[in-house]
Amino acid sequence: MRLLPWILTIFALGCALLVLWLSSDGHLQRQLTHRTWAFEREQEVAEETAALLLDRKLNRWQEQGELLLLANGQLQFESRVVFGSLTDKPALRLLIQGQWLLSEGFVSFTTSSISFLPTNAPGKQLLAEHESMLEHLVRNRFNRIRKVMLTNEHTLLLSEDEEALWGLQERAEIPRPTLASTLW
Amino acid sequence: MLLSPLNEEELASLLQKQAFEPEEVTAWSRPRLRWILGSSLLALASLCGLYRWYLQQPQLPTPLLLEWQQGAPIAIDKPELVTCLQRWGHNKSLPAAEHILLEPSDLGWSVVWISAQQTYNYQWTDAQVQACH
């Protein structure tokens, strides 16, 4: 009976600290970091800005990529992009490195470097003609502040007013063959 | 001169007893009780906070088709649209959807197809949604 006040105090303080921690950005940040978030994106409508910048009518933007967020605020985004135009299908590999910041349930992405590698001849030609414009286009699509929502442990939704909803899913780790399993 | 039925010694003893007698203690004046009540209130408030946090946890509602409105999912009861979207997903060889989210955007409609393994993002024109509907 003499210990009752102590037990109650410790319990109450523990609960209060737990509520503070769960409601903080730190908890959400912990759920987002050190996981690879994968997505596939396909846009089948003509985008006027892209057409203007790249001097060609694009009718499809197909992308498959991954996003990695580190606890120190750094991010890496990698994707394979295939543009669909009336004449050819330029394909590129896109790598973005930059920073991310989480605040009050919103995440902001900032790029510090963008690099492209062509994966086919039309891609090489597109890059030779419009690398700078492509960089503007990618930066404009990527550098945004988006609302974060984890719908379950493995699905992440990033939303922004007037922009497309972006769904990502934690990539399931596929066990790679080991040397032992390969040799035997 | 005031006459008292008590003698001087008895009177002194009575006054002394009264002076040193502890005051009547109310329940609230006990520090331990105040401590217990304070801790209980804090524990109760924290538990309420935990429950509130649990209720605020984002969870997609059960229906397959949801419309994203101002950052929150809203269930849509349109079986023909669900059937059409499922047929479209089947034609594109997409895995079975756990949820399909629709959100109006500048370029038409965002369609987010959430399956158990992967999430797919598409952009539909208004005409496509109308045709499906």
Image: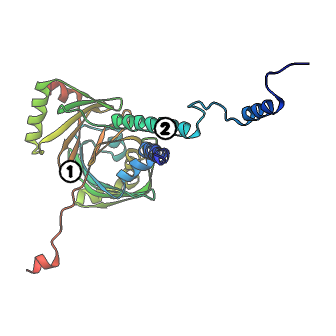
Rendered view: A40 above or below A94: above
Same chain shared by disc 2 and disc 1 = no
Residue placed most toward the observer, A31 or A67: A31
Please tell me whether mark 1 sits on a helix, a strand or a loop: loop
Which amino acid does the dot numbered 2 rest on? Leu
Give the number of the mark in front: 2 or 1: 2
Residue placed most toward the observer, A166 or A131: A166
The residue positioned 41% from the left and 53% from the top of the image is: A132
Do we see residue A174 in this rendering? yes
The answer to whether residue B1 is left or right of residue B71 is right
State yes or no: discs 2 and 1 in contact (Cβ < 8 Å).
no
Residue placed most toward the observer, A175 or A162: A175
The residue furthest right is B1
Please tell me whether mark 2 sits on a helix, a strand or a loop: helix
Q: Looking at the picture, how far across and down is residue A53, in whole percent?
A: 37, 45
- Residue A17 marker: none
Do we see residue A103 in this rendering? no
User: Disc 2 sits on a residue from what chain?
Assistant: B
The answer to whether residue A181 is left or right of residue A34 is left
Rendered view: B102 above or below A14: above
For disc 1, the marked residue is A88
Q: Looking at the picture, how far across and down is residue A85, in whole percent?
A: 22, 45
Cα separation, mark 2 vs mark 1, equals: 67 Å
Which amino acid does the dot numbered 1 rest on? Asp
Question: Within 10 Å of the Cα at label 1, are there few (<14), some (14-19), or many (20+) other Cα atoms?
Answer: few
User: Which of the 4 quarters of the picture holds residue A92?
Assistant: bottom left
The answer to whether residue A135 is left or right of residue A88 is right
For disc 2, the marked residue is B42
The answer to whether residue B85 is left or right of residue B49 is left
The residue positioned 32% from the left and 37% from the top of the image is: B58
User: Disc 1 sits on a residue from what chain?
Assistant: A
Q: Looking at the picture, how far across and down is residue A94, in whole percent?
A: 32, 57
